[in-house]
């Protein structure tokens, strides 16, 4: 289904838990309030939403959070979503801590790809950024994912806490390993509005100074707005998601749904359409009408360039970024 600006909306990102994703203790402070389970959608409710979306043209799904792998039985959900008629791709975003132990079940249920959030390869820096000593588990998960043949991507958010040695080490992953390393400009949402980010343009320039002139990689890598490049001698690719310095709103194809069933059309704004009550009342047509409304009310563009106009105040972990 197309929105009023002619964009084909075919991608839904689904948060299955509002738990902290344990990624960065600077951006997600200790003591975040957890949501009671009865306020979260069940897997069956999530599947019903996705069936309604598929009937309207949604074909690609991303399971995210918070941290999705902390929710028991999430592999079962992957299988439920894969079996929906019209769904062509189901992928997952994780911090990677539990990935190694969960991957066999996820693959058996048909998972098409995994994105792993990681901001450094240095154990001391990882402990400084996250407050935890779990880098070895994450890297074991990355290695297992690559060897399994599942499409694997590393997500690096460029905040003031990421140093040159961090992004350089992560870029090197794509040199010897067939995966994508994606550099993501920090969006000024929630706690992200309190810390500084820096430009993909600057980082990509430094990458080319180190590794040579990049060529555009025209192969299809996924569902979202990343632009990919190949560097001389690299096995994998470098991706750029430039929300601030490369506004991609003109071809945005996505909606988001929180773990509590709030349908959201743009990260920048607090606007939501609640689905949980509609689902529990059992009216499928009302759920489909809510989807249509979310698509029709989708805005032309974000306003990250003017932070005073950004109305979303929640942490990214609470809205399924």
Image: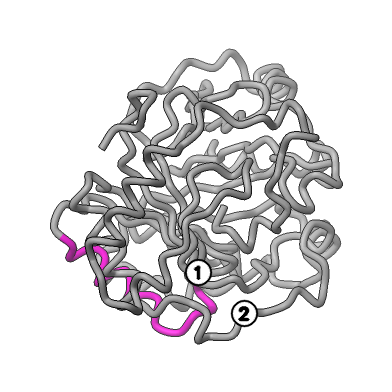
| Label 1 neighbour load within 10 Å: few <14, some 14-19, many 20+ | many
Please give the range of residues in magenta: 68-84
Q: Quadrant of the N terminus?
A: top left
Q: Are circles 2 and 1 on residues that touch, CB within 8 Å?
A: yes
Which residue is at 46% across, 22% downward?
250
Going 53% across and 39% down the picture, which residue do you hit?
174
Q: Is residue 102 left or right of residue 118?
A: left
- Say whether residue 321 is magenta: no
Q: Which residue is mark 1?
A: 259
Looking at the image, can residue 50 be seen?
A: yes
In the rendered structure, find residue 35 and report the number of the disc placed on it.
2
Vertical position of residue 293 compared to residue 251: above or below: below
Q: For this view, does 212 lie left or right of residue 57?
A: right
Q: Earlier in the sequence, mark 2 or mark 1?
A: 2
Question: Is disc 2 placed on a helix, strand or loop?
Answer: loop
Q: Is residue 79 magenta?
A: yes
């Amino acid at each position: 289904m197309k929105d009023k600006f002619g964009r084909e909306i075919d991608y839904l990102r689904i948060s299955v838990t509002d738990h902290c994703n344990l990624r960065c203790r600077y951006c997600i402070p200790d003591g975040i309030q957890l949501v009671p389970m009865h306020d979260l959608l069940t897997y069956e409710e999530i599947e019903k939403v996705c069936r309604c979306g598929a009937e309207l043209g949604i074909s690609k799904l991303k399971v995210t959070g918070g941290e999705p792998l902390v929710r028991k039985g999430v592999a079962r959900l992957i299988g439920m979503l894969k079996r929906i008629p019209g769904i062509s791709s189901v992928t997952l975003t994780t911090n990677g801590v539990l990935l190694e132990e969960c991957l066999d079940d996820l693959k058996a249920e048909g998972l098409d790809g995994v994105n792993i959030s990681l901001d450094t390869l240095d154990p001391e820096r990882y402990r400084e950024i996250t407050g935890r000593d779990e880098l070895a588990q994450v890297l074991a998960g990355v290695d297992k994912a690559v060897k399994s043949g599942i499409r694997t991507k590393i997500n690096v958010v460029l905040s003031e806490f990421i140093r040159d040695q961090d992004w350089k080490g992560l870029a090197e992953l794509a040199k010897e390993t067939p995966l994508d390393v994606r550099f993501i400009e920090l969006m000024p949402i929630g706690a992200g509005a309190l810390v500084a980010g820096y430009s993909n343009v600057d980082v990509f320039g430094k990458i080319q100074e180190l590794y040579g002139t990049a060529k555009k990689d025209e192969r299809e890598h996924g569902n979202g707005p990343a632009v990919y490049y190949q560097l001389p001698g690299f096995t994998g690719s470098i991706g750029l998601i430039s929300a601030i310095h490369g506004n991609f709103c003109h071809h945005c194809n996505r909606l988001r749904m929180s773990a509590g069933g709030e349908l959201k059309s743009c990260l920048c704004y607090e606007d939501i359409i609640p689905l949980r009550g509609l689902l529990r009342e059992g009216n499928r047509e009302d759920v489909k009408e809510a989807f249509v409304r979310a698509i029709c009310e989708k805005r032309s563009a974000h306003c990250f360039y003017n932070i005073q106009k950004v109305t979303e105040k929640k942490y990214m972990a609470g809205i399924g970024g």
